[in-house]
Amino acid sequence: MKDSIKWTQNTLAPSDCSASLGLIDASAVKKVRAFHASIPQYAPTPLARLDALAGHLGIQGAYVKDESHRFGLNAFKVLGGSYAIGVYLAGLLGKDISELSYGELISPETKAQVGEITFYTTTDGNHGRGVAWAANRLGQKSVVCMPAGSSQVRLENIRKEGAEAFITSTNYDDTVRSTAELAKADPHGVMVQDTAWPGYTQIPGWIMQGYSTMAAEADEQLKAQGVTPTHIFIQAGVGSLAGAVQGYFANAYQDACPTTVIIEAAAADNLYRSAQAGELVAVGGDLQTIMAGLACGEGNVISWEILKNKAGFFVSAPDWVSAQGMRVLAAPLKGDAPVLSGESGAVGVGLLSALLSLEEYQGFREALGLDQDSVVLCFSTEGDTDPEMYKKVVWEGFCPSCEEETK
């Protein structure tokens, strides 16, 4: 018997989120995109148009931003880490990031001026690989700490980018705290984390800005097809990505922002619980879920300001939702191209499929206003970053949280 999808509509009282929202305004997005475009390996990732799936589900359109192509790293996270490191180095030179090209940042002259820096971060895999990739190309060091249960393949991929990396014995949030202590003890250490907490907000803000490139690309790609989304399904771990996507579209579509659904793994649904509690709360424990990229129990305070004011709905999704999304994308209906989407990447499509296929979610469908005129944008934030788990789910039918009840 499948665990149920839980959802709640955002009924929180409005507050002033102008400072957080301003991080993702048009001028900031323009600067971020110019930085990313200056990197030789940059190219916009594809936007998959799934007409057959949309027809099957009874909606007008279904689109998936495919981040498995991002910089050859199989995930979107490098957008945030690279931009944050770039902005940090520019600051050491007394300049704005817009005054420096990528070529200047990686030059021996820049390295001589800024000296040796070690960038520290905690990750389940994708963010750490992005930080390691960026630090390596900018001639700097990185130390990447991973929570207990992290994939060995993801660890090795991070080490291949030149980082010192290891798996700890604690969960994600406790590993963040221990990593921050390591960075603090290193005279050349800098913490580059997408989790923000009181006293640590500047670098997480830069990381959120970096993620806006993905949202802006998707918006442009939809506009090129004459399409405006009515709904956006976006997943959340600490919430930095969700806040960036929500912030981008809230700024770009002020008078008609698409209805946004924030999706978390049920084992780490702090934002869903926060929406119910009326304040940001944390989820503890081992946070076990196949959606490793979403296994974060403590939310980003910056992005929460955006989400609690602008998000439409919050969802707590069992693992089977992600597994379903992976299979739908891997084996599409005739006419749709396949999308290689990993456990944390596919949950949006999995949720969309479940809501429009299962009668038990009729109430949620109606609350969302999903119908024949709906155009839904999802973000597949990673490819098969854990190939063995990908094959286990897609090839072998592994379905967490949906085992049959024993009689």
Image (cartoon, grey):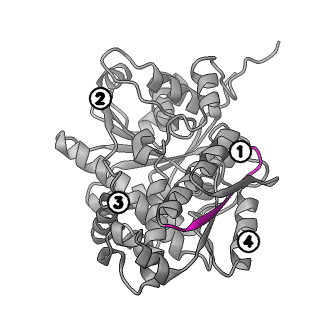
Q: Which mark is residue 182?
A: 4
Rendered position, 65 above or below 361:
below
Viewer-side residue, 361 vs 62: 62
| Res 150 label | 1
Callout 1 amino acid? Ser
What segment carries the magenta color? 139-150
Q: Say the numbered circle drawn on residue 372.
A: 2
The image quadrant where one finds the N terminus is top right
Label 3 near label 2: C-beta < 8 Å?
A: no
Rendered image quadrant of residue 232 = top left
Q: CA distance from mark 2 to mark 3?
A: 37 Å
- Neighbor class of circle 4 (other Cα within 10 Å; few <14, some 14-19, many 20+) is some
Placement of 191 over or under 173, stated as above or below: below
Q: CA distance from mark 4 to mark 3?
A: 29 Å
Please name whichever residue, 230 or 215, is drawn nearer the observer in this view of the structure: 215
- Farthest bottom residue in view: 94
Magenta span includes 144: yes
Whole-Å distance between the Cαs marked 2 and 4? 53 Å
Label 3 crowd (10 A; few <14 / some 14-19 / many >=20): many
Residue at disc 3, secondary structure: helix
Q: Nearer the viewer, residue 111 or 263?
A: 111
Which of pointers 2 and 4 lies earlier in the amino acid sequence? 4
